Image: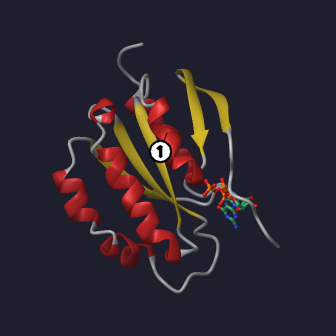
Amino acid sequence: MVFFPQVGTNLTDIMAHKKITIRELGGCMGPIWSSYYGNCRSLLFMIDASDPTRLSASCAHLLGLLSAPPLAEASVLILFNKIDLPCFMTVEEMKSLLRLPDVIACAKQNIATAEISARKGTGLTGVLRWLQDAHRTGV
Ligand SMILES: Nc1nc2c(ncn2[C@@H]2O[C@H](COP(=O)(O)OP(=O)(O)OP(=O)(O)O)[C@@H](O)[C@H]2O)c(=O)[nH]1
């Protein structure tokens, strides 16, 4: 089966104590992500954990986001998605390849990580809890 990368942007409102609007931006839209940095309070950065061949592209995107001044105050959650699928590399190995401990230590933002399966729902309760915490204060 062939999948085409997401083009366009989806807005979804969720209720997590208060209304939080989530904007989904596809990976191939990287060149225009910066148009949406204003108003961004938290960042969910999704990595396809079933396809480590895309890790270096993900790493470049992530470093670009973390160094963007409008996102300096954002809370960041890095999601390793599709953990229900078999993969030749473990998530720990991917974190190591990404030098994630160093990235987290050097970043201005608070960064957490989670392993999820959007398809099976694994780990999504934790993501919701993280969103609630990230949006607990302020408007
Ligand atoms: N097995 C499995 N499939 C998933 C999961 N999440 C998404 N998919 C499927 O993967 C396919 C492609 O989805 P994504 O990789 O999210 O595609 P996309 O949003 O276009 O990706 P980008 O453009 O890179 O952002 C779809 O058929 C999804 O249903 C998951 O956790 N497990």
Which image quadrant: the N terminus?
bottom right
Q: In the image, is 123 to the left or to the right of 63? A: right
Q: As displayed, is residue 139 above or below residue 50?
A: above
Q: Which residue is drawn at 45% across and 70% down?
A: 55
The residue lying toward the viewer, choosing from 113 and 40, is 40
Task: Report the front residue among 3 and 44.
Answer: 3
Residue 120 pos. (x, y %) = 69, 60
Image point (56%, 53%), residue name: 27
In the picture of the structure, the residue carrying the numbered disc 1 is 44
Taking the image as drawn, is residue 118 in sight?
yes
Q: Quadrant of the C terminus?
A: top left
Q: Position of residue 17 (x, y in %)?
A: 52, 22
Q: Residue at x 27, y 44 (%)?
A: 67
Q: In which quarter of the image is residue 23?
A: top right
Colour approach in the figure: secondary structure
Location of ligand 1 given as a quarter of the image: bottom right
Residue 15 in percent (x, y) is at 60, 25
**Is 17 on the left-hand or right-hand side of 136?**
right
Up-down relation of residue 25 to residue 17 (above or below): below
